């Protein structure tokens, strides 16, 4: 499959049904010059448009033997592989340094300190984000690699932190629900309807008009203590989520898509979906109707310094107000039974401008 980078609404890679792999990278701005940032966004946009069509960003093997290839070449012959590259702008973009303070998306700010935070500085922050998703991991990697080269070449930005995810842990329209590394189906009750995207994801008002149909991206690198998890009894695992592991059904139902009954009690008067169950705390029924789009991926960093499997979830959510993420995460951080098995070790927040129109580039209007 091939997706278009240019468009009328949000950037590709948000509504797009999640592809199998991700390569996610954040960058620090290294030049104080507005012009350098502008050139970077323009060059990235041109490159991304070509990459998403399955093309290269320039010559791989120039005819002059003493010339350097522009495209690194490792995605030749692999096709577009459903590649989408989604670019986000962090808080530092919208400062006086770049003359862009008056263009700041109204709700863009650093996230509040949250109860679950165990954030490592080297996995946190960033001034630009690049989310490359594809059905072939090499296609995703190639895209980010070549964008990182452009960043270096312009002198505008340098790599900050990165995660390579190998399996989707969220579902879009028409997709079967995949599993996260705790073995549970993840993405059962995600946003899929157009009306919910309009209501909860795309920005419709506030801020400069070029921001319409933009959205906010929150990313969290969440480490899972999978070896502890693997020794936990199945009844407890099911209670942690409030769902059955194999079927994905809520503990009050029989099928995956049955609506959870959060009031149901067993004959002993105990809640069937426990008070500390992840889905009870996160569900829109228990959060004044709030919903976020989850577009997460499983990741592994191999083994850690004491020989334990090092893996987790690259949690990515999109919402038209970052406070929606914070509201849910505040509840999860305080009481989620899952907390015993996870740590939030990385974090970032970015404004994701709408898709550029053909002939323009990402956020072009903010420079005019
Ligand atoms: C639901 C796993 C972190 C928000 C679920 C479900 C699973 C799951 C298995 C049930 C299936 C579904 O409806 O998708 C995890 C794991 C996490 C994690 C393993 C961390 C490693 C988070 C975070 C948030 C979040 C950080 C947001 C702050 C939600 C929401 C639902 C959900 C909104 C849907 C609840 C419902 O409507 O029933 N998660 N999750 N999750 N999760 Fe998480």
Image (cartoon, rainbow, N blue to C red):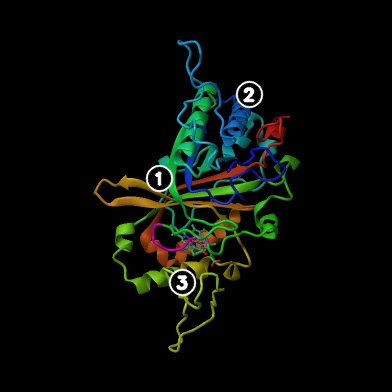
The residue closer to the viewer here, 93 or 216, is: 216
Are the two marked residues, 2 and 1, in contact with CB atoms closer than 8 angstroms? no
Secondary structure under the numbered disc 1 in the rendered image: loop
Q: Is residue 189 above or below residue 344?
A: below
What residue is shown with label 2? 35
Which of the two labelled residues, at mark 2 and mark 3, occupies the earlier sequence position? 2
Discs 2/3, front: 3
Residue 353, horizontal then vertical, whole percent: 65, 41
Determine the CA span between mark 1 and mark 3.
30 Å
The image shows residue 319 at horizontal and vertical percentages of 61, 53
Q: Position of residue 251 (x, y in %)?
A: 47, 76
> Mark 3: which secondary structure?
loop
Q: Secondary structure at mark 2?
A: helix
Q: CA distance from mark 2 to mark 3?
A: 52 Å
Q: Is residue 95 left or right of residue 205?
A: left
Q: Which residue is mark 1?
A: 120
Query: Which of the 4 image quadrants contains residue 175?
Result: bottom right
| Mark closer to the chain start, 1 or 3 | 1
* Front: mark 1 or 3: 3
Q: Which residues are magenta?
A: 181-187
- Single out the residue that lies furthest toward the left: 306
Residue 231 within the segment the image draws in magenta = no
Name the foreground residue: 324 vs 224. 224
Task: From this view, report whether residue 135 is shown above or below residue 276.
Answer: above
Residue hosting label 3: 242
């Amino acid at each position: 499959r091939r997706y278009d980078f240019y468009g009328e609404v949000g950037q590709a890679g948000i509504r797009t049904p999640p592809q199998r792999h991700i390569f996610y990278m954040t960058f620090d701005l290294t030049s104080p010059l507005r012009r350098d940032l502008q050139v970077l966004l323009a060059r990235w946009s041109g490159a991304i448009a070509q990459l998403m069509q399955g093309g290269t960003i320039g010559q791989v093997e120039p005819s002059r033997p003493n010339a350097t290839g522009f495209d690194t070449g490792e995605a030749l012959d692999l096709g577009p592989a459903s590649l989408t590259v989604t670019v986000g702008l962090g808080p530092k973009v919208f400062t006086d340094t770049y003359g862009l303070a008056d263009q700041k998306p109204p709700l863009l700010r650093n996230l509040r300190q949250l109860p679950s935070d165990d954030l490592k500085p080297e996995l946190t922050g960033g001034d630009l984000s690049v989310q490359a998703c594809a059905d072939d991991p090499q296609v995703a990697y190639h895209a980010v690699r070549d964008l990182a080269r452009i960043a270096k070449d312009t002198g505008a930005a340098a790599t900050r932190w990165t995660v390579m995810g190998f399996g989707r842990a969220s579902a879009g329209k028409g997709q079967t629900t995949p599993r996260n590394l705790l073995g549970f189906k993840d993405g059962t009750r995600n946003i899929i309807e157009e009306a919910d995207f309009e209501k909860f994801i795309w920005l419709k008002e506030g801020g400069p008009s070029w921001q319409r149909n933009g959205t906010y991206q929150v990313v969290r690198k969440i480490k899972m203590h999978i070896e502890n998890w693997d020794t936990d009894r199945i009844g407890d695992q099911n209670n942690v989520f409030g769902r059955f592991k194999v079927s994905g059904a809520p503990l009050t139902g029989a099928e995956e898509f049955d609506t959870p009954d959060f009031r149901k009690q067993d004959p002993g008067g105990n809640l069937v979906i426990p008070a500390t169950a992840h889905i009870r705390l996160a569900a829109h029924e228990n959060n004044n109707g709030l919903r976020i789009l989850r577009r997460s991926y499983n990741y592994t960093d191999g083994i850690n310094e004491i020989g334990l499997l090092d893996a987790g979830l690259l949690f990515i959510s999109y919402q038209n107000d970052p406070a929606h993420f914070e509201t849910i995460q505040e509840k999860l951080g305080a009481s989620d039974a899952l907390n015993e098995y996870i740590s939030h070790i990385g974090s970032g927040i970015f404004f994701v401008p709408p898709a550029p129109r053909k002939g323009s580039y990402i956020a072009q209007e903010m420079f005019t």
